[in-house]
């Protein structure tokens, strides 16, 4: 993913509207690119600071951002694991079906 794509994804991430492969690519890019990370952090801090002034919320904005990134990364990892498990189950089901077809065919010959 290129840095110029990040501008749109930063806003989607901050507003909890980014998902799937885009989320994975975004997290990977943000972890590697300090320019995009700083841009995301600035946008997040501005948005959250304004919201929290109105609601008297926590002011550890950087800590909250790091927690959001950590939780998002964990969700991406869980999603990838579920996808892998789903694929293994489908492969096993296909092999069981194939075995049964071969067994039934051999039994009736």
Image (spheres, helix red, strand yellow):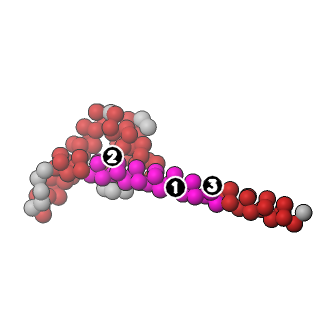
Mark 3 Cα within 10 Å, few/some/many (few <14, many 20+)? few
Please say whether residue 71 is visible from this viewpoint.
Answer: yes
Q: Earlier in the sequence, mark 1 or mark 3?
A: 1
**Residue for point 68% across, 60% down:** 96
Was residue 33 drawn as part of the magenta stretch in this picture? no
Q: Quadrant of residue 2?
A: top left
Q: What stretch is highlighted in magenta?
A: 68-93
**For the residues carrying marks 3 and 2, which lies nearer the camera in this image?**
3
> Which quadrant holds the N terminus?
top left
Please say whether residue 46 is visible from this viewpoint.
Answer: no
Tell me the residue that label 1 is attached to: 85
Mark 1 Cα within 10 Å, few/some/many (few <14, many 20+)? few
Left or right: residue 22 compared with residue 14: right
**Residue for point 27% across, 52% down:** 68
Residue 6, percent from left and from top: 37, 41
Q: Is residue 58 above or below residue 44?
A: below
Q: Magenta region's main secondary structure?
A: helix
Instruction: State the mark number for residue 10.
Output: 2
Total numbered circles: 3
In space, the residues marked 2 and 1 are separated at their CA atoms by 30 Å
Instruction: State the mark number for residue 91.
Output: 3
């Amino acid at each position: 993913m290129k840095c110029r794509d990040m501008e749109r994804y930063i806003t989607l991430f901050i507003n909890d509207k980014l998902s799937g492969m885009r989320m994975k690519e975004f997290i990977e890019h943000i972890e590697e690119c300090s320019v995009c990370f700083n841009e995301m952090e600035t946008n997040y801090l501005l948005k959250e600071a304004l919201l929290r002034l109105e609601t008297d919320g926590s002011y550890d904005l950087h800590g909250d951002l790091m927690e959001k990134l950590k939780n998002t990364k964990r969700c991406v990892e869980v999603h990838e694991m579920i996808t892998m498990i789903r694929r293994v189950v489908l492969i096993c089901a296909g092999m069981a079906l194939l075995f049964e077809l071969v067994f039934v065919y051999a039994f009736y010959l």
